[in-house]
Amino acid sequence: MLRVLFSLLIGFALLPKLHAHEFYFAYAEINYNEINRRFEGTLIFTTHDLERAIEPKGTLIGKFEKLDETSAELKRIEQYINQHFQITYGCALDSNAVDVHCQSSFTLEGIVTQLNGTIACYISAPVSAIYNPLHFKFDALMERFPNQQNKLTFTYRNQTETFSFLLYDQPKYFTLKP
């Protein structure tokens, strides 16, 4: 009887570890739309990882699956994305010459939660003019999950490049070709 109780105690102690996963991923696909002069794309996260990153106490767990366009949590997702996914680029304020570096400010256009446990966040950001160099920062979820690895695929005209991001491996650079 004592062995059974001991086995149950050990089993319950290990149960949270069985549901945890050691590796975390987020994906982004972004392109520069020259006609509309904006960055457009999708960021994909594991839903419960994003919920925990935004609210470490766990009060958001399960809520992202039920969001609608009036939910206050959408603003929190947008703020989180703008803190942890950034594009810095050369821009011209007063001329056709690069005179300052601008930083993206994304708008969350919408979200879709998937049956596979992921959430797709559709984003866009206006861009007045874009010049070299482009710097990408994508450290989403890394403050909560140090083993996080993020991937970004960026497309400009016929150029497409994929970048991998680790906690201590930021930022990445992209050079626009005419």
Image (cartoon, rainbow, N blue to C red):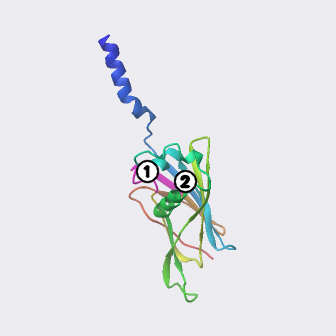
User: Which quadrant: the N terminus?
Assistant: top left
Q: Kindly identify which residue carries mark 1.
A: 55
* Number of the label disc, if any, that sits on residue 174: none
Number of residue marks:
2
User: Three-letter amino acid code at disc 1?
Assistant: Glu
Residue at 42% in and 53% down: 142
Relative vertical location of residue 165 with respect to residue 134 in this rendering, above or below:
above
Kindly report which numbered mark, 2 or 1, lies closer to the viewer in this rendering: 1
Could one spot residue 42 in this view of the protein?
A: yes
Relative vertical location of residue 69 with respect to residue 100 in this rendering, above or below:
above
Q: Kindly identify which residue carries mark 2.
A: 27
Q: Residue furthest left?
A: 2
State if disc 1 and disc 2 touch (CB < 8 Å).
no
Could one spot residue 160 in this view of the protein?
A: no
| Residue 28 x, y percent position in the rendering | 56, 57
The magenta stretch is: 140-151
| Residue 171 x, y percent position in the rendering | 44, 65
Label 1: which secondary element: loop
| Residue 175 x, y percent position in the rendering | 54, 72
143 or 152, which lies in front? 143
